[in-house]
Amino acid sequence: MTASLPTDTVSTLLRQERIFVTQPHLPPLEQFMPYLEQIWQSKILTNGGPFHQQLEQTLCEYLGVPYLSLFSNGTLALITALQALRITGEVITTPYSFVATAHSLLWNGVKPVFVDIDPRTFNLDPARIEEAITPQTTAIMPVHCYGQPCDVEAIRKIADNYNLKVIYDAAHAFGVRKNGESVLRHGDLSALSFHATKVFNTFEGGAIICPDAKTKQHIDHLKNFGFVDEVTVVASGINGKMSEINAAFGMLQMQHIDRAIERRREIGATYRRLLADVPGVRCAESSPDTESNYSYFPILVDEEYGLSRDALYHKLRDHEIYARRYFYPLISDFPMYRGLASAQRSNLPVASEVALKVLCLPIYPELRDEDQGRVIEIIRAARA
Ligand SMILES: *Cc1c(COP(=O)(O)O)cnc(C)c1O
């Protein structure tokens, strides 16, 4: 069978497979066919069709949130959330995130003000927020980094005191609960991402969690050019709608999501157990009151390990294991943000240190035990 393949292909096949930091969860293709047939029959491809409506309702129930508006991706959800709340001036946010967090502010003509993170949770440190507030500050945009809940109570108190809005970038926080309640219910709005690399994916996709029906309606208008009906446009809206194909795929994914998260939990527990005694390798803490989604498995590589984080990163790559340095560089260190953030950058000692030590290890439902074993083996052996 392999005889017809060129020899270099054969040798590639025989080599160990590459392991990436994540791999999108895809149900068997034949399970998707009936959904496609329905779309072909109805000829409804987008504009809030039946799958779009079903997925919004299903997600509200699953996530335990009152209202949700689907988007074509998480970045448009963030941009539109800021539009919906008419955010202007300056917004306090974290430098330790994916670049879309701060980009969404720039797309709204808003200046990001970067504040340092908590070394334990990697989230915006509430104790550092107040000193960054100026008369121009209108909102706080924290990230539940790696799905770890922010200190939502402390952030709410500050926001209330200074009359600021809170928009959570909840791209990592699908299904995360604290004390039995969804973390997505906090803040004025939360934005989710359903990108291929996230715990729940619709290829591309996202959503805004809304506290009430009126806000959802406003956001539904904004994501559809501002149309209210055939002849009425109420706002300079954008096209941020999720298509029926993506929404149908989301409905199928929902049948597999619990098992996918359970498998992630097992993988996380194995890393924790087998890396516990490696000097200089610290696994992120998990809190007993939090139901995690195990979206990422970050470790911090300290001096005690004997090898730098980057040396370990390259060692893993030599073995075709593509761990990722999320989040390095900090957003505030990207050249386009440097000028803007020059005065702030010296104020970010914790984020700067974590960015140099962090490494996210492969974690995804289809990761095989033997492949995870290889990752662990290399980390254990590399320091010798
Ligand atoms: C993935 C991600 C986004 C962007 O979501 P997209 O759906 O890819 O547009 C925003 N913020 C964070 C923290 C993310 O991880």
Image: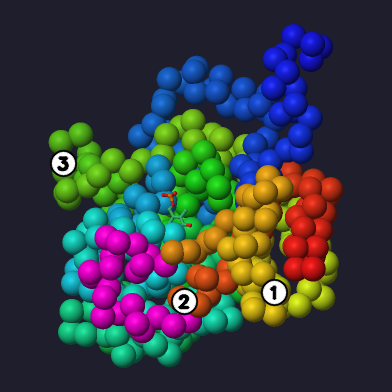
The question of residue 322 being in magenta is answered with no
Q: Which of pointers 2 and 1 indicates the residue nearer the eye?
A: 1
Over which residues does the magenta segment extend?
A: 330-351
325 or 57, which lies in front? 325
Q: Mark 3 points at which residue?
A: 232
**What whole-number distance in Å separates the C-alpha atoms at marks 1 and 3?**
65 Å
Question: Residue 222 or 152: which is nearer the viewer?
Answer: 152
Q: Can residue 188 be seen in this view?
A: no
Task: State the SS at label 3.
Answer: strand
Q: How many numbered discs sit on the rendered protein?
A: 3
**Rendered view: 200 above or below 5:** below
Query: Which corner quadrant of the image does residue 12 belong to?
Result: top right
Residue 246, position as x, y percentages in the image: 49, 35
Q: Name the residue carrying label 2.
A: 351
Give percent across and percent down for residue 88: 19, 68
Amino acid tagged 1: Gly
Q: Any mark on residue 306, and which?
A: 1
Question: What type of secondary structure mainly makes up the magenta span?
Answer: helix
Image quarter where ligand 1 lies? bottom left
Question: In the image, is 106 to the left or to the right of 94?
Answer: left
